[in-house]
């Protein structure tokens, strides 16, 4: 691959609703630019960007992939991101490296939830964006209808720079609105050829060009003055204005075509070259100096000291860890030493690569604005800044959504625990949107993700990448027990079996703690030496061991106060062990008399929902034994604050997607323990006894 200057680079991220044709769009660009010699198909599992086992099996993208290609004098780095909501973290990290986001929209289904989410996110991070209306060769596709949807939904900044020739099965070409040049598809030779604009489309193309000139003029005072006085702008002025307008987020160019047939892809490439900003146009990025924390602006400039952000990591058990980065300034070469600002460690850079799916293309250097990869960095992980030691700076960390859906990971084969732990930690390096927790109480490894499919794929990757099979189960719920009454009981342990006997006698008052604390409160009110001082710690120790297992279903006992106020002893047969046993006898008797009850964890839930889905979401919370505490406005949505038992929330990610057509989101936090309703408690206690 030849060398390119920063101004001749284009970094584009392909985003949008799942099923809108993002992977085929990437594939078609690679094929048109001759980066590949055969057009792969998602259905056949042989595309460049969907190369993981799960992607081939499920026919969806589950990971962001990078593919580089060349078009005339421009190098294009394509970042193909998943559209499925469980993998939004992949989109977030991929967009950290791009200069323009191309939002794919299906010509048949139009604007969907994923389109809206993509637009909202690029607005949030102030990233230039464009649209590609795909699948125009399909039945029921309608360019005009989808364009109108885009304008109604996202405003007048939406400007069509291309126009289709033909509809549905007769879709055969694309017109470049700015140059007024058309290309049509030669189905026999399977190539695009220059053609005249059909007479019936001239008026529509002129209207589109007028829309573009108006949008461009609004971004620049000089262009506006000329447009108002002359009523027209030339091609160079339009292209210059488009680049600036796109870069500022004031214009969203709209392109169109068919990825499957390759119709319009050449025109798309022309516009990527002429209309899209290069990394040089990117606004300065905020960073901070490691030494004093002061802020610094980093402009993409090859003449500045080297710095880069690692935006993705691939964990491969055979090749090792592959760190993918975008150079923000300077350049990096093979066999050099760099500094990791986040880990305060020095790293040795070995061989550098450009990526095309899983294919690694060796290179001697990666310059400012370009995207490269390096293998086997020891300390570096996703989100880290690597830089020249002469300028130690760090960029802001990537912000990921918090995973809330939990599953327990159970080994299918005994002895695989270490392999599972190792595999999960390596997968964590490439996917920061899931968490690993260890539930010591129930001896379970818990993984948390963004949805059911997300967790299933983590389980599948453990098998395909690390050779260990697991079962994903609903985690055990950390129930607790407490008492609601008061009991004053005696626990007496007396045993004679030849030689020294065993004697311990205690009288303990059990009641619920009034201060609300969970831990056992032990109170010593013994007077007159009824229980000698040396045995009182043994009584407390015995009780603390007992609270680990309650009398109903064996769950830990909380909010318990135990007051030792009387007892008796034997001068020869009493011992610490005897008093521990006496305490345990008192504990069991006391909890039964004071009426033990079962408690369940209650979670505070905050649900962000579209206003039209409020009724269904609140009804579902009520069905889950939840209590709605309040509602408030949240941007264009509504926030519902509620308390819901944890037992009802394990599948909530799936339920909420169904209720809100994937528009809703939620967060969970432990709030308190509450008594389980009697009917539910009976089921839990019965289940616990059957397990025992």
Image (cartoon, grey):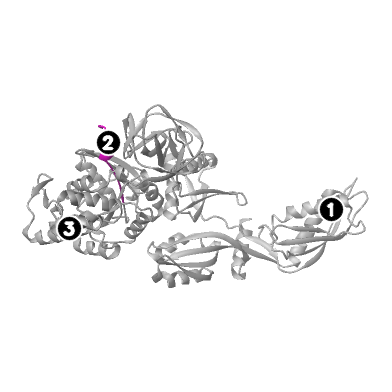
Contact, mark 1 vs mark 2 (Cβ under 8 Å): no
Tell whether position 126 is magenta.
no
Circle 3 is placed at which residue position? 227
Q: Residues within 10 Å of mark 2 (few under 14, many from 20)?
A: some
- The answer to whether 209 is drawn above or below residue 629 in the figure is above
- Tag 1, which secondary structure? helix
Return the residue nearer the eye: 463 or 624: 624
How far apart marks 3 and 1 lie (CA) works out to: 93 Å
Q: Which mark is residue 536?
A: 1
Where does residue 81 sit, x and y in percent of width and height? 34, 49
- The answer to whether 115 is drawn above or below residue 416 in the figure is below
Return the residue nearer the eye: 285 or 530: 285
Where does residue 64 sit, x and y in percent of width and height? 36, 46
**Count of numbered badges drawn on the protein:** 3
Marks 1 and 2, the one that precedes in the sequence: 2
Where does residue 479 sit, x and y in percent of width and height? 62, 60
Point out the frontmost of discs 2 and 3: 3
Q: Residue at x 10, y 44 (%)?
A: 189
- The answer to whether 554 is drawn above or below residue 13 in the figure is below
Q: Which mark is residue 5?
A: 2
Report whether 653 appears left or right of 122: right
Point out the frontmost of discs 1 and 2: 2
Q: Residue at x 23, y 52 (%)?
A: 242
Report whether 374 appears left or right of 26: right
Report whether 133 appears left or right of 173: right
Return the residue nearer the eye: 525 or 484: 525
Query: Which residue is farthest top?
Result: 335
- Tag 2, which secondary structure? loop
Marks 2 and 3, the one that precedes in the sequence: 2
Residue extent of the magenta highlight: 1-14
């Amino acid at each position: 691959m030849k060398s390119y200057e920063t101004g001749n680079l284009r970094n584009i991220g392909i985003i949008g609703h799942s099923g809108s044709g993002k992977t085929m769009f990437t594939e078609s660009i690679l094929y048109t630019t001759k980066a590949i010699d055969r057009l792969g198909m998602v259905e056949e599992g042989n595309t460049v960007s969907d190369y993981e086992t799960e992607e081939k099996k499920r026919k969806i993208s589950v990971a962001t992939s990078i593919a580089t290609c060349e078009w005339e004098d421009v190098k294009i780095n394509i970042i193909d991101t998943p559209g499925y909501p469980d993998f939004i973290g992949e989109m977030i990290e991929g967009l950290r490296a791009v200069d323009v986001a191309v939002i794919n929209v299906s010509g048949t289904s139009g604007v969907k939830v994923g389109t809206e989410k993509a637009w909202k996110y690029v607005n949030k991070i102030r990233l230039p964006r464009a649209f590609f209306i795909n699948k125009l060769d399909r039945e029921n596709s309608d360019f005009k209808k989808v364009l109108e949807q885009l304008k109604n939904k996202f405003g007048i900044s939406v400007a069509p720079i291309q126009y289709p020739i033909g509809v549905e099965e007769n879709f055969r070409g694309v017109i470049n609105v700015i140059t007024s040049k058309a290309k049509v598809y030669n189905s026999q030779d399977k190539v695009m050829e220059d053609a005249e604009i059909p007479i019936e489309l001239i008026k529509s193309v002129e209207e589109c060009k007028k829309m573009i000139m108006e949008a461009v003029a609004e971004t620049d005072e000089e262009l506006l003055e000329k447009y108002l006085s002359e009523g027209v702008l030339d091609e160079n002025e339009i292209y210059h204005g488009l680049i600036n307008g796109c870069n500022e987020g004031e214009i969203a160019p709209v392109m169109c075509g068919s990825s499957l047939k390759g119709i319009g892809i050449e025109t798309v490439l022309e516009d990527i070259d002429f209309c899209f900003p290069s990394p040089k146009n990117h606004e300065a990025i905020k960073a901070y100096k490691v030494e004093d924390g002061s802020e610094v602006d980093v402009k993409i400039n090859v003449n500045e000291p080297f710095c880069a952000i690692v935006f993705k990591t691939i964990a491969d058990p055979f090749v090792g860890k592959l760190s993918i980065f975008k150079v923000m300034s300077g350049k990096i070469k093979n066999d050099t030493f760099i500094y990791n600002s986040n880990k305060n460690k020095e790293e040795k850079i070995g061989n550098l690569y450009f990526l095309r799916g899983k294919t690694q293309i060796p290179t001697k250097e990666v310059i400012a604005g370009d995207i490269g990869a390096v293998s086997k960095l020891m300390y570096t992980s996703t989100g880290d800044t690597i830089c020249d030691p002469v300028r130690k700076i760090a960029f802001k960390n990537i912000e990921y959504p918090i995973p809330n859906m939990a599953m327990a990971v159970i080994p299918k084969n005994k002895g695989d625990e270490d392999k599972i732990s190792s595999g999960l930690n390596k997968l964590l390096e490439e996917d920061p949107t899931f968490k690993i927790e260890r539930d010591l109480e129930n001896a379970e490894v818990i993984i948390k993700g963004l949805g059911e499919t997300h967790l299933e794929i983590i389980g599948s990757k453990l098998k395909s990448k690390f050779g260990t099979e697991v079962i994903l189960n609903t985690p055990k719920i950390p129930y607790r027990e407490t008492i609601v009454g008061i009991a004053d009981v005696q626990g007496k342990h007396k045993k004679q079996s030849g030689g020294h006997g065993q004697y311990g006698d205690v009288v303990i008052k059990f009641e619920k703690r009034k201060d609300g604390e969970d831990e056992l409160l032990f109170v010593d009110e013994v007077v007159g030496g009824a229980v000698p001082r040396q045995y009182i710690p043994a009584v407390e120790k015995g009780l603390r061991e007992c609270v680990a297992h309650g009398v109903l279903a064996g769950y830990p006992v909380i909010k318990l106060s135990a007051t030792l106020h009387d007892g008796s002893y034997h001068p020869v047969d009493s011992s610490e062990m005897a008093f521990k046993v006496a305490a345990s006898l008192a504990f069991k008797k006391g909890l039964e008399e004071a009426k033990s009850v079962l408690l369940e964890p209650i979670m505070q839930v905050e649900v962000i929902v579209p206003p039209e889905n409020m009724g269904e979401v609140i009804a579902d919370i009520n069905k889950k034994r939840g209590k709605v505490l309040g509602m408030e406005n949240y941007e264009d949505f509504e926030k519902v604050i509620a308390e819901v038992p944890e037992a009802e929330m394990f599948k909530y990610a799936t339920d909420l997607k169904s209720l809100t057509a994937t528009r809703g989101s939620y967060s969970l936090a432990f709030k308190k323990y509450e008594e389980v309703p009697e009917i539910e408690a009976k089921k839990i206690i019965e289940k616990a006894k059957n397990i025992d």
